[in-house]
């Protein structure tokens, strides 16, 4: 836990935790609104967005990339609505049509444009490269955290993601009431003037912002996993919303830390001399947590399934006492 | 362009021709099975299936590399992919059935976790120092360039087999899609049919991996069926049309992609399918944008005509330019705005229609509300004759008494 840790692991770990927490917080509402796959769609269309931004500006400057990805994400959400309403296509299929088409367009644009000189490829957009975000200026070890010059040399992703996480928290605090009512009873929300439509769209925009800010550090796969797995696991732990959010944050942080450590050191423990993808490992750990919650979460059945099980138990008991 | 035409006419070499035909058969099978999956409202399950293939692909590659030194054995890779995709499918089913989580959350969780684990295994492969690593990367986005003849033949034959399976199972599939309960009374095992449907979907996905890539294969099972939905309301035709669109997209896409190096097969096929979709969205005679627009314009014209005629009957002046235009076109008024003989007859008829409809709405408000286009359709066509006769009798009892 010395200088090596500060230089090599501190920043990736912090970034991983920030990504996981911001995505998981928003994911709670996506899961409850049955919009889980919006996260999937949004993170796929990030690719055409960044390729388009590159072709348009000719640079790989972070600002242009993020803006391009953000525009693509909002455009995709609007297109899904258009296909759904105009074509009267069911929501899942409309989503499938739009995001696969945009992703294909991104792949084609990427192959057609000359991106060999810059670091821009499909694999990077899909699973990022968390391990490369090292902090060389942190060579002084822990004291570097107090050194302004060293702090200025932090990878720019870290302050950006900190800002996004803060924005997510502020968004949830400001629109908490509207979000909650709109999530559980959209008709009632409409009737009391909580504007479920605009607030729902704002939620999707926040999802796009979080996904876009996260993808260039960690790739889109971990983003999808974090939107869904921790909130889904948290949903199986409790029936109340605030505890669910708390559980999801805990699961997200555990996934980030455990995933990063397992990816970096797991193979070494097994005697191999390499490390594996941290983003992939974080997603895997999140999946394992969800699997555990599915098998043993105290509220895993919900009311409907629980009632059915109770009936079955009662029936079997009465048949035993009869016989 | 000439390279494209040559490829389209299957003249660009045996392998390219085989790949093009294989892609067409694959597109056809994917479109057909996708139709049933769409009608069952489970389109995005195929997203979980396709991402779920990655760990199996990677494990099969590692196993073959350790055993034989080369991981690029397409049959082994397909078996591995099918195995892990099947596991993913099982997880989606299990989570949806045994916990409170909904299917969308289950799909998203399975696809991201399986894909993430697959990425972990891919990084293991990168460190294995074995040959043919580019072979596995081709499965992410699909690549037909440099495909072996045996691979192309395997894909074509397997795609044909799934097509045959869909043909054999089309009746139970259709029944289960529309009415589970009725299907069950006809002696069809709904669970087994669902399982078969997902099995065929899985097979199509696995076969298509090499051509379209695992991120994009899902498009082949979603876009052609949605496109077909614009052209028909009958399931049998929808399956055929979806298969035709899928086959055309596969054929044209593979041919375009073969004509130039910088055109990745999967992306081009998907974009071709998307072009068909966009055209259908705009041009479809039943549900398209254009026909929707035409219906709206027609409706507007009829409203203006009716309002204009009522105004004529009341002897009021008409100022609205569109109303004047519509009435003139129909020959109800002359250029100076004076009603023609036909116009006066039509105005009287319109007044009577309005009166009959008004009476009907007052007497039978519920039935009237249930009618879609109340008021503008001729009442004799919208309602049964005995109801109209009754309304007419109530409207002018004297006339009815005279008869």
Image (tube, rainbow, N blue to C red):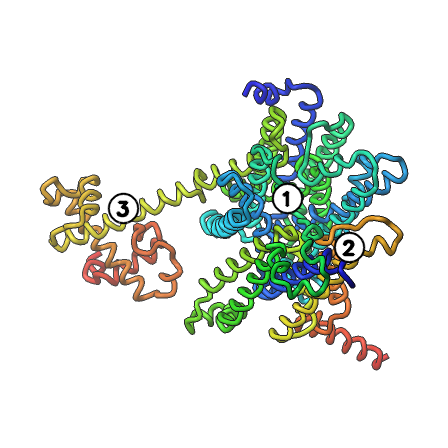
Q: Quick check: A240 left or right of A286?
A: left
Residue at mark 3: B301
> How many numbered marks appear?
3
Q: Which quarter of the image is occupied by the N terminus of chain B? A: top right
Rounded to the nearest whole Å, what is the CA distance between mark 2 and mark 1?
Answer: 29 Å
| Location of residue B282 in the rendering, given as x and y in whole percent from the top left corner | 44, 40
Chain of residue at mark 2: A
Q: Are marks 3 and 1 on the same chain?
A: yes
Residue B4 drawn above or below residue B321: above
User: Secondary structure beneath disc 2?
Assistant: helix
| Neighbourhood count class around disc 2 (C-alpha, 10 Å): few under 14, some 14–19, many 20 upward | many
| Residue placed most toward the observer, A185 or B145 | B145
User: Secondary structure beneath disc 3?
Assistant: helix
Residue at mark 2: A263
Name the residue: 11% across, 44% down: B337
Give the number of the disc on residue B218.
Answer: 1
Name the residue: 88% across, 40% down: B66
Q: Is label 3 in contact with label 1 (beta carbons under 8 Å)?
A: no
Q: Are marks 2 and 1 on the same chain?
A: no
| Location of residue B54 in the rendering, given as x and y in whole percent from the top left corner | 74, 46
């Amino acid at each position: 836990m010395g200088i090596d840790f500060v230089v090599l692991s501190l920043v990736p770990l912090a970034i991983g935790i920030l990504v996981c927490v911001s995505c998981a917080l928003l994911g709670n509402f996506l899961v409850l609104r049955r919009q889980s796959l919006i996260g999937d769609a949004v993170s796929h269309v990030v690719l055409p967005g960044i390729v388009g931004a590159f072709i348009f500006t000719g640079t790989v400057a972070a600002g242009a990339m993020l803006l391009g990805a953000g525009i693509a994400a909002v455009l995709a959400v609007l297109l899904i609505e258009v296909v759904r309403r105009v074509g009267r296509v069911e929501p899942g299929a409309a989503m499938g049509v739009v995001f696969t088409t945009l992703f294909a367009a991104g792949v084609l644009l990427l192959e057609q444009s000359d991106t060999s000189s810059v670091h821009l490829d499909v694999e990077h957009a899909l699973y990022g490269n968390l391990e490369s975000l090292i902090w060389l200026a942190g060579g002084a070890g822990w004291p570097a955290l107090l050194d302004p010059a060293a702090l200025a040399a932090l990878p720019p992703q870290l302050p950006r993601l900190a800002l996004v996480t803060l924005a997510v928290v502020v968004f949830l605090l400001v629109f908490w009431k509207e979000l909650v009512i709109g999530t559980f009873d959209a008709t009632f929300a409409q009737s009391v003037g909580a504007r479920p439509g605009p607030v729902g769209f704002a939620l999707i925009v926040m999802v796009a912002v979080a996904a876009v800010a996260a993808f260039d550090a960690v790739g889109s796969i971990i983003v999808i996993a974090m939107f869904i797995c921790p909130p889904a696991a948290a949903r199986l732990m409790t029936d109340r919303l605030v505890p669910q959010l708390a559980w999801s944050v805990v699961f997200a942080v555990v996934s980030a830390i455990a995933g990063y450590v397992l990816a970096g050191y797991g193979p070494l423990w097994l005697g191999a001399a390499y490390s594996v993808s941290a983003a992939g490992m974080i997603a895997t750990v999140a999946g394992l947590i969800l699997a555990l919650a599915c098998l043993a979460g105290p509220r895993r059945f919900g009311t409907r399934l629980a009632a059915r099980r109770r009936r079955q138990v009662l029936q079997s008991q009465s048949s035993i006492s009869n016989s | 362009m000439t390279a494209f035409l040559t490829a389209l006419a299957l003249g660009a070499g045996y392998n390219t021709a085989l790949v093009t035909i294989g892609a067409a058969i694959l597109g056809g099978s994917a479109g057909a099975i996708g139709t049933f999956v769409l009608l069952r409202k489970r389109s995005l399950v195929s997203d979980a299936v396709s991402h779920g293939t990655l760990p199996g692909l990677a494990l099969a590659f590692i196993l073959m590399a350790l055993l034989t030194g080369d991981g690029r054995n397409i049959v082994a890779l397909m078996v591995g992919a099918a195995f892990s995709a099947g596991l993913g499918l099982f997880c989606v089913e299990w989570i949806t059935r045994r916990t409170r989580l909904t299917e969308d959350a289950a799909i998203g969780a399975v696809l991201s976790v399986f894909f993430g684990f697959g990425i972990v295994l891919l990084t293991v492969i990168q460190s294995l120092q074995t040959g043919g690593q580019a072979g596995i990367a081709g499965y992410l986005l699909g690549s037909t360039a440099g495909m072996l003849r045996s691979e192309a033949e395997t894909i074509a034959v397997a795609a044909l087999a799934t097509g045959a399976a869909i043909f054999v199972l089309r009746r139970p599939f259709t029944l289960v899609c529309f009415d589970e309960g009725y299907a069950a009374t006809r002696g069809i095992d709904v669970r087994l049919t669902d399982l078969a449907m997902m099995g065929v979907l899985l097979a199509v996905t696995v076969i298509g991996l090499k051509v379209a890539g695992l991120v994009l294969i899902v498009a082949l099972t979603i876009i052609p069926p949605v496109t077909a939905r614009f052209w028909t309301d009958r399931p049998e035709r929808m399956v055929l049309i979806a298969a035709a669109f899928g086959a055309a997209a596969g054929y044209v896409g593979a041919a375009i992609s073969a004509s130039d190096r910088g055109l990745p097969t999967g992306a081009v096929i998907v974009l071709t399918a998307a072009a068909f979709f966009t055209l259908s969205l705009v041009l479809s005679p039943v549900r398209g944008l254009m026909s929707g627009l035409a219906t709206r314009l027609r409706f507007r014209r009829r409203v203006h005509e009716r309002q204009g005629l009522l105004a004529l009957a009341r002897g009021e002046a008409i100022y609205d330019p569109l109303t004047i235009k519509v009435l003139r076109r129909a020959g109800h008024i002359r250029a100076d705005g004076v009603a023609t003989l036909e116009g006066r007859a039509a105005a009287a008829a319109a007044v009577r229609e309005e009166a009959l409809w008004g009476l009907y709405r007052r007497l039978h408000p519920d039935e009237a509300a249930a009618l879609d286009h109340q008021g503008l359709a001729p009442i004799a066509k919208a309602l049964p004759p005995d109801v109209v006769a009754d309304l007419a009798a109530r409207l002018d009892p004297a006339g009815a008494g005279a008869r």
